[in-house]
Amino acid sequence: MRGGAEVRGECVGDYTPTPEDKFAFGMWTIGHPGRDPFGDSTRPPIDPVDYVKGLADIGAWGVSFHDDDLMAFGAPEAQRRAELDRFKKALDQTGIVCSMATTNLFWHPLFKDGAFTSNDRNVRRYALAKSMRNLDVAAELGAPTYVFWGGREGVESAASKTPSDALDRYREALDFLAGYVVDKGYNIRFAIEPKPNEPRGDTFLPTVGHALAFIHTLDHADMVGLNPEVAHETMAGLSFYQGVAQTLWQDKLFHIDLNDQKIGRFDQDLRFGSEGLKDDFFLVRLLENSGYAGPKHFDARPYRNEGADGVWDFARGCIRTYLIFREKAREFDANPRVQQAFADAGVPELAIPTVGAFTPAAAHELLDEKFDPEALASRGYRNEQLDQLVIDTILGA
């Protein structure tokens, strides 16, 4: 079965992905062994070659990896080379592209106090060297984006790090690695992945807003953007849709992690579309209407009680749900009732400049203008009507 057009033997629509859709999965997603803080693995690991072949079978386009997903931590160079060559051969045979790479700077105990922001200078230097080596691998595999998730960059005790020093070291690390990429001539951009907490009690660069502000302090700000994730912004109690919208507005959406999340819970990495149907509908509509051309990358995990077949049901489900939402978004925008509801709500009016650029004459004109506050206050914006049309579309009414 290819592309998820068939579910449990019942054909309910043709939602077959194409390479142009750019659906991608991390090696740690479908292949997650089901381990959690309270229990060990529930299924065996998937060999990287079998993983790539499985992605091709479901119609995916790309794969991403941490260095340690692909090459065993601490392995000698000959073993690393053999593992990498074997992976490259699978990519060549299937047509799956390497869509993104990143460094595992969180698993080994040496990173328990952080990587780029560890209080131990030698840990920080090791983290940089580890990242440089995997940047070489990313360039060899043709990955256009390199993600930095600072999972261990943070604190439990606020007394343990001076925040300004930590941010200085974070900035120093990204500036150094950007310089390395420029010096090597690699065609790679960086994407910061914010997260408010977990595994650390508090994480540096916890939200989209923090990361966007941080980027403007970097030496190579033009080559650094964001990789926002549904679950992470939701954990912070924020609207992922609004975060992505501002990231797009600032031309900084270099990559995106699609999954789902219950509000107020630990980082669940649920199948995309399995929880926030309304939010996910607007997210897909935003991505499709904005012209975003990057990967639709699923950073999610199958349920722990799934077996070897169920993990691929999970992957097909992620793709299928995105394509259903895309179809629904097109239906919504083409509906004449929706267009009238937009007009009733004044949606097109917001695109009209309020005053334009400042001039003394414009300021004088504005101050002289007569307003009727009571008349302005009496306007109704018909948002209930508009929102019900959203629900009707999602539910197929």
Image (cartoon, grey):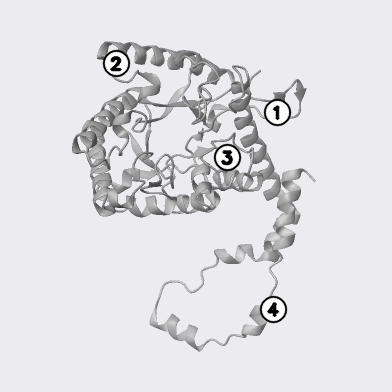
For residue 185, say whether it is visible: no
Image position, residue 337 (x, y; %) = 76, 56
Query: Marks 4 and 3, Cα distance to the nearest angstrom?
Result: 39 Å
Element type where label 3 sits in the image: loop
Q: Which residue is mark 4?
A: 378
10 Å crowding of disc 3: few (<14), some (14-19), many (20+)? many
Judge from the rendering whether residue 52 lies leftward or rightward of residue 331; answer left or right: left
| Looking at the image, residue 292 lies above or below residue 320 | below
10 Å crowding of disc 2: few (<14), some (14-19), many (20+)? few
Query: Marks 1 and 3, Cα distance to the nearest angstrom?
Result: 23 Å
Q: Which residue is mark 2?
A: 75
Query: Marks 4 and 1, Cα distance to the nearest angstrom?
Result: 47 Å
Precedes in sequence: disc 2 or disc 3: 2
Image position, residue 288 (x, y; %) = 57, 43
Precedes in sequence: disc 4 or disc 1: 1
Q: Nearer the viewer, mark 4 or mark 3?
A: 3
Query: Marks 4 and 2, Cα distance to the nearest angstrom?
Result: 71 Å
Q: Can you tell which quarter of the image residue 376 is in?
A: bottom right
- Amino acid type, mark 1: Asp
Precedes in sequence: disc 1 or disc 3: 1
Q: CB under 8 Å between callouts 4 and 1?
A: no
- Amino acid type, mark 2: Ala
Q: CB under 8 Å between callouts 1 and 3?
A: no
Element type where label 2 sits in the image: loop
